[in-house]
Image: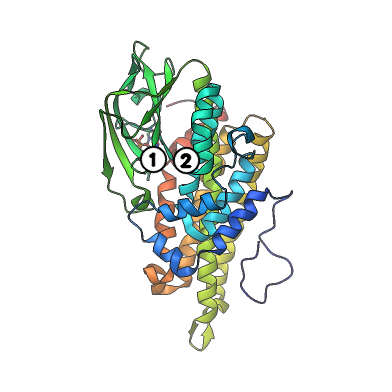
Amino acid sequence: MTLVPSAAPAEQVLEPLDGPEHDAVNRARELVARINDETAADLAARTEFPADLWEWAAEHALHRVGIAEEHGGEPADIVAKMRIAEVLAERVGVLAWVWGISNCFAAPLLAALADEPTRKELLPGLAAGRLRFAFGVTEPGGGSDLFGALDTTLADGRVSGRKRYCTAAASADHLFLLVREAGAPAGGTSGLAFALVRTNAPGLSMSRVPTPSFASSFGTYEVDLDGVAVDHAFTGPAVKAALRTVLVEERLLIPAIVIGAAHGALRRGLAYAARRTAFGTRVDSYQALQHQVADAVMDLETARHYAYAMARRWAAGAPVTIGADVAKSRSVDAAQRVADVAVQLMGGIGFTRWGGVEHVWRDLRAFRLAPITEELVRNRVARSLGMGRD
Ligand SMILES: Cc1cc2nc3c(=O)[nH]c(=O)nc-3n(C[C@H](O)[C@H](O)[C@H](O)COP(=O)(O)OP(=O)(O)OC[C@H]3O[C@@H](n4cnc5c(N)ncnc54)[C@H](O)[C@@H]3O)c2cc1C
């Protein structure tokens, strides 16, 4: 990957990753080649779901990635999905979730939990980009203490309760909701189930949570469920394993998105600083700025390789738990600093929409608290070392 726009030295700090690229990564490159600076700025400023970006992903057959061929998909592991996310995010920032949130949650959950008729009913629509899904785990009682706060109940094929921060719910056809079977003891993981409901089902209502960041385009929603009939309920021991799979894969996908977004911002910052002069000198020749860029890029590249190493391990079937948390934590930290340097390189312009980087700087903040907070990551790391619980 080349960051420096001109007069690039032969050796790059940012090394290509090992191994051949999945064909879909090239299709993602073709998609982003269609998006010029003006369109990227327009997408970043949206307050509505970017349906056009979703359609372009469909035209480039990206929604089918990771879905079995018999359901209209093409197999892909988490490494391939990360590469697609990284390529998209470099151009459209964290709006890359437009593709990821539906495909990367719903496809593995349906593959792991649904029977064949249900897969046949839903996966071809997902693969073709006709169906959209959102994922509701968090409740108003808390996201960190997920199981302690889980109050949404499944009884007699109906769900009741409330979900918070259900991102892209209003533009989704179906919601995958983590619920608890009625009668199971509260707290802990007893009676965990997934309920698949239609967003237009009677008894379901939603209201938008006001957010300043990328979620202002997808929207993130509070969803009220009052005896909503479920289309499909998934119960039994497979639920816990499927939940774990999507939580690990989410924490691996986020590094790809934040790193791609940070690279995109830095590329714009560097291009600006190469054109801008101060005191008769190109701004990018000032060592004070160069060292900020170098420090941030070294950390980002280190985090990038760690994240892909964890992803390869996971794709090979090895257990990855804390590694995915660490990948998320380190990459978000490094990406935030790169985005901050990108703003700095551009001076005042960096803080305006004209510069095309402030939205990345702002959007990345959300990933320090979602899908897992930085404090919880540190708790998990400390416990993995055998340290006591508070
Ligand atoms: C933009 C956005 C999009 C989201 N999208 C989705 C989505 O699509 N689906 C979904 O299900 N969820 C979604 N979420 C929810 C997200 O996963 C939660 O916000 C996150 O898990 C944190 O939960 P909380 O907000 O309830 O914070 P809390 O759990 O209330 O935590 C508050 C603070 O207390 C700290 N804390 C809590 N427990 C401990 C402890 N044991 N040790 C130390 N510190 C602790 C936390 O680290 C945090 O700093 C989204 C959130 C945002 C902001």
The reply to whether the residue tagged 2 has its Cβ within 8 angstroms of ligand 1 is: no
Which of the 4 image quadrants contains residue 146? top left
Give the class, few, some or many, for how many residues have Cα within 10 Å of label 2's Cα (few <14, many ≥20).
Answer: many
- Across and down, in percent, residue 235 comes to 46, 17
Q: Is residue 40 above or below residue 153?
A: below
The reply to whether the residue tagged 1 has its Cβ within 8 angstroms of ligand 1 is: no
Q: Residue furthest bottom?
A: 280
Ligand 1 quadrant in view: top left
| Label 2 SS | helix
Circle 2/circle 1 CB separation < 8 Å: yes
The numbered disc on residue 172 is 1
The disc labelled 1 sits on which kind of residue? Ala
Judge whether residue 247 can be spotted in this image.
Answer: no
The numbered disc on residue 102 is 2
Give the class, few, some or many, for how many residues have Cα within 10 Å of label 1's Cα (few <14, many ≥20).
Answer: some
Residue at x-position 69% and y-position 52%: 17
Query: Which quadrant would the N terminus be assigned to in this image?
Result: bottom right
Which of the two discs, 2 and 1, labels the residue nearer the N terminus?
Answer: 2
Query: Which quadrant would the C terminus be assigned to in this image?
Result: top left
| Closer to us: 2 or 67 | 67
Q: How many marks?
A: 2
| Closer to us: 185 or 71 | 71
Residue at x-position 27% and y-position 48%: 210
